[in-house]
Image (cartoon, helix red, strand yellow):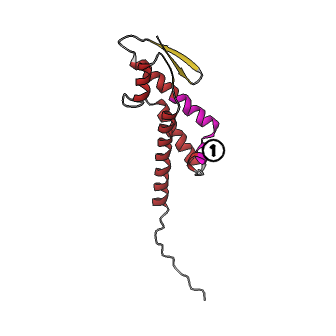
Amino acid sequence: MKTIKAGRELFRISDSPNFAENEVFHLIQNFRASLVRSLIAAGLDTYIELRFRQRIGPQMLADLERSLTGLAHSPVLSGEFVDVVNAIRKFDFYALPSEPFYRQIDERLRQGLIQTEINFRTSSKRTPRLYALSRTA
C-alpha cells in the first residue's frame, strides 16, 4: 500500500503490479483543483500582482479566474506530472509537491495575461476619424 500526502490529507492507493494510475491521476487532479480554489479564495489579483508585477482590472480578474477554474476541472493527461507519477511508483510514502502545479497554474495565468495584452493593443489602435468642422458665422 502506498501513502500519498496531498496538502493536509493522506491517501492510500494499491501497490499492486497493476498500479492504479487512474486513481493517481484523479488524486493529482483533485490536488491541483484544491490549489486553484485556495489561490482564488486568497486573492488571485494579489497573487498576480506579486508574482507577475502586474495589476489587473475586475474583468481580467474574472477571465483569469474562469481560466483557472477550467484548468482545475480538466483531467490530468498522462504526459503531465510524469515526475510526480514516477515518484509515487517508486516510494511507499510521497508528499505531492506544489511546485509543478504552480508552474502549470502560472503558465495558464501568463498565457491569459499575454492574450489580454494582445487584445488590448489591437483594440486600442485608433482609427483615423474625420471630423466635420462647422463654420460659425
In the rendered image, the vertical position of residue 90 relative to residue 52, given as above or below: above
From the image, give the main secondary structure of the stretch colored magenta. Answer: helix
Does 135 appear in magenta?
Answer: no
SS at badge 1: helix
Which residue is painted at 47% across and 26% down in the image?
29
**Vertical placement of 91 versus 44: above or below?**
above
Taking the view exactly as shown, the residue that stands out farthest to the front is 91
In this rendering, the count of numbered labels is 1
Q: Position of residue 126 (x, y in %)?
A: 48, 67
Q: Residue at x 40, y 15 (%)?
A: 20
Residue in front for this viewpoint, 113 or 127: 113
Q: Position of residue 99 (x, y in %)?
A: 51, 34
Q: Is residue 34 above or below residue 126?
A: above
| Crowding at mark 1 (Cα within 10 Å: few <14, some 14-19, many 20+) | some
Taking the image as drawn, is residue 18 in sight? yes
Residue 125, above or below 61: below
Q: Position of residue 79 (x, y in %)?
A: 36, 31
Residue 17 x %, y %: 35, 11
Residue in the foreground of this view, choosing between 9 and 2: 2
| Magenta residues, start to end | 32-50
* Amino acid type for the residue under numbered disc 1: Thr
Q: Is residue 63 found left or right of 19 in the rendered image? A: right
Q: Which residue is mark 1?
A: 46
Q: Residue at x 49, y 46 (%)?
A: 110
Q: Quadrant of the C terminus?
A: bottom right
- Of residue 129 and residue 34, the one placed in the foreground of this image is 34
